[in-house]
Amino acid sequence: MSVIWITCLLFAVFGVLLFLGCPISVSIVISSIVTALSSLSWDQITFITMQKMHSGIESFSLLAVPLFILAGNIMNNGGIAKRLVNFAKLFCGRIPGSLAQANVLGNMLFGALSGSSVAAASAMGGSIYPIQEEEGYDPAFASAVNIASAPTGLLIPPTSAFIVYSTVAGGVSISALFMAGYIPGILMGLAVMVVAFLYAKKHNYPTSGHTPMAEALKITLDAIPSLLLIVIVIGGIVGGIFTATEGAAICVLYCLILSIFYKTIDLKSFMQILLNSACTSGVILFLISASSAMSFVMAYSGIPAAISQGLMSISSNKYVILLLMNLILLVVGMFMDITPAILIFTPIFLPIAQSFGMSDIQFGVMLVFNMCLGNITPPVGSVLFVGCGISKISIEQVTKRLIPYFAVLILVLFAVTYIPALSMGLPTLMGLV
């Protein structure tokens, strides 16, 4: 069977299973086995599939993923979000639509701490949306701001997305990836703030006014323990004091101590947090395990090389190829969550990007940025559903308000794609590459 038919078979079976409502991890395994039957015996397939699924998660680095998930869940229930919202409002009080601006800044801070766009949208939206409603903000606008800015936490470290990518890409430096995500993540947040400012200015949204010095000092002191987490974890990882996995464990311990100190967590709620974290971790790790089997089948069948040749046959211009890759990833992000997308498309597109001289670090940032946009677009955008659920606004209403944000974020994505310094500047400056 030719590579083209094998490629069509793999993605056809995968697509049909998803359409029928089969869980994505199960769809990956079944489509991989069906495709492998074209060239291997049943005994070989079952043995190799189990072996690859086991070895795919037999990694010390991947232990950071469930730990960061646990840390994010503790933060989401530990009173940290409210303190960060208050801290963010200090910087946005005199800007039109100051609550919307505080929402964006809060998402950047909380996302950087939790590494989860869904947690950020839930925590920040839940804390600030009722206040926006009282002050007469358009509910669809308020929801759109929260949704558009929540994915910044997938780029601003620490983030498990880069840890997953590092594993799939063959051990790319996690420290370098973390540093590479800062500028694109901040640019993403600033782009949302600019659009929100223009809308608020046009509709005469109020400012929060000046905060008295004594109150500002109290709010800052309340927020410092939470903000120190970024310094401790990122500083320790980049400084080589501990690994990303050890940093994740320290993050869990620090968040737990902080939540106990704030008296916002008890034994019952902590047990529920552990249960939720275990369920989420199980789903993600099974996805990674299943995708390892698919990666083997694709490599064995020559699918990445065939797709590469197909793209190269369209054009040999690297700018055109990178544009096509972004368009494909944007469409993929609309239907697929970030973890399986990273696992499936990294082996396909990374060799193409490297052939044009793009660093594996820059490609990782570009890939995650695309998936950030997928998080806020229908029909499968997880952040979109969470944000709409908090405000109780229909997806159709919010999607209209999201269009200007999406347009601006696309421009930032292209800047990250075509200007290497935006992602490579900090890692190079710090001697990580």
Image: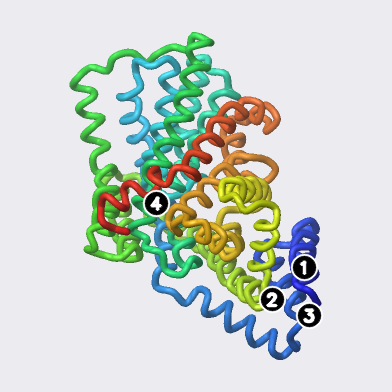
In the rendered image, residue 310, in percent from the top left (x then y), is placed at: 70, 60
Looking at the picture, which amino acid does disc 3 mark?
Ser
Q: CA distance from mark 4 to mark 1?
A: 47 Å
Residue 191, compared with residue 420, is above or below; it is above
N-terminal-most mark, 2 or 3: 3
Q: Secondary structure at mark 1?
A: helix
Looking at the picture, which amino acid does disc 1 mark?
Ile
Q: Secondary structure at mark 4?
A: helix
N-terminal-most mark, 3 or 1: 1
- Residue drawn at the location 43% of the way across and 61% of the way down: 163
Q: Secondary structure at mark 2?
A: helix
Quarter of the image where the N terminus is located? bottom right
Residue 181, compared with residue 70, is above or below; it is above
Residue 67, compared with residue 390, is above or below; it is below
Q: CA distance from mark 1 to mark 2?
A: 10 Å
- 23 to the left or right of 242: right
In the rendered image, residue 130, in percent from the top left (x then y), is placed at: 49, 25
N-terminal-most mark, 4 or 2: 4
Q: Which residue is mark 4?
A: 74
- Residue drawn at the location 44% of the way across and 32% of the way down: 127
Q: Which residue is mark 3?
A: 38
Residue 282, compared with residue 139, is above or below; it is below
Circle 3 Cα neighbour tier, 10 Å, few/some/many (<14 / 14–19 / ≥20): few
Q: Which residue is mark 2?
A: 301
